[in-house]
Amino acid sequence: FRRVLFRSQPFSAVFLSQIQEDLLEVRSYYGNGVKQIILVTGDAFALPTRDLKGIGKLIASIFPRIDTISMYASIRNIKDKTDEELLALRALKLNDFNIGVDSGSEAALAFFDEGFPLHEAKEQLLRLKRLGCCYSINLMLGAGDRGKGLESARANALLANLVQSRLIFGSPLHVDRGSALGRLIQA
């Protein structure tokens, strides 16, 4: 299972045996009373539902008091899962997602080639809310064009007020060398 994450960094899934080894190491330090686990590094929600279920069951077997399994997720990968799959994952405590929406501005999403339009982000976030899933959103500050900072801030505020996520993370604009934006800035 390989795909490109963040365009320049290869993404690959690890084997369940490696996850088990990592979890057992965590248990050796903290005991079995851990209540939250965060699946880090990339978009874990890209994994097929059956794999995520396996991870959830494994975590529950090692940490029987687990309340929350958190991970990064993308709008595309949320859209790829059915309501039934999302509810099944939620039942296994995979119920806290950190989602990089990046902007409430349709123009900014298109410019950054996020792979989803704003209406789709809204639909998927509201679907998570309707299903009782907990999530946070990441919004880039300064993602509007020059002179459009206030417009960008308003668009972000409208999105945040609509979806009512648990947390909102604001991050500065990051520009990768060689990206379309990087070339535009250099020119």
Image: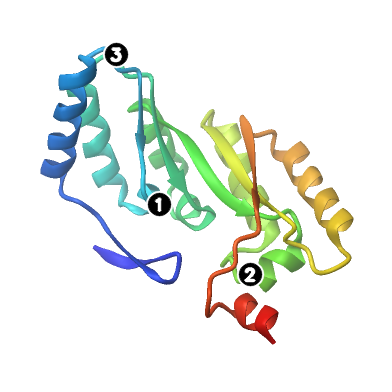
**Which residue occupies 54% across, 46% down?**
99
Residue 45: give x, y in percent of width and height. 39, 48
Marks 2 and 3, how far apart in space? 41 Å
Q: Which disc is residue 112 wearing?
A: 2
Q: From the viewer's perspective, is residue 54 above or below residue 10?
A: above
> Which sits in the foreground, 112 or 79?
112
Real-space CA distance between mark 1 and mark 2, rounded to the nearest whole angstrom: 18 Å
Q: CA distance from mark 1 to mark 3?
A: 25 Å
Residue 168 position, x and y percent, is 65, 37
Label disc, if present, on residue 43 of the rendered structure: 1
Above or below: residue 102 compared with residue 62: below
**Label 1 packing within 10 angstroms: few (<14), some (14-19), many (20+):** many
Residue, disc 3: 65
In the image, 40 versus 125, the foreground residue is 40
Name the residue located 61 percent from the left edge and 52 percent from the top edge. Answer: 101
Choose between 122 and 103: the one closer to the eye: 103
Residue type of the residue flagged with mark 2: Phe
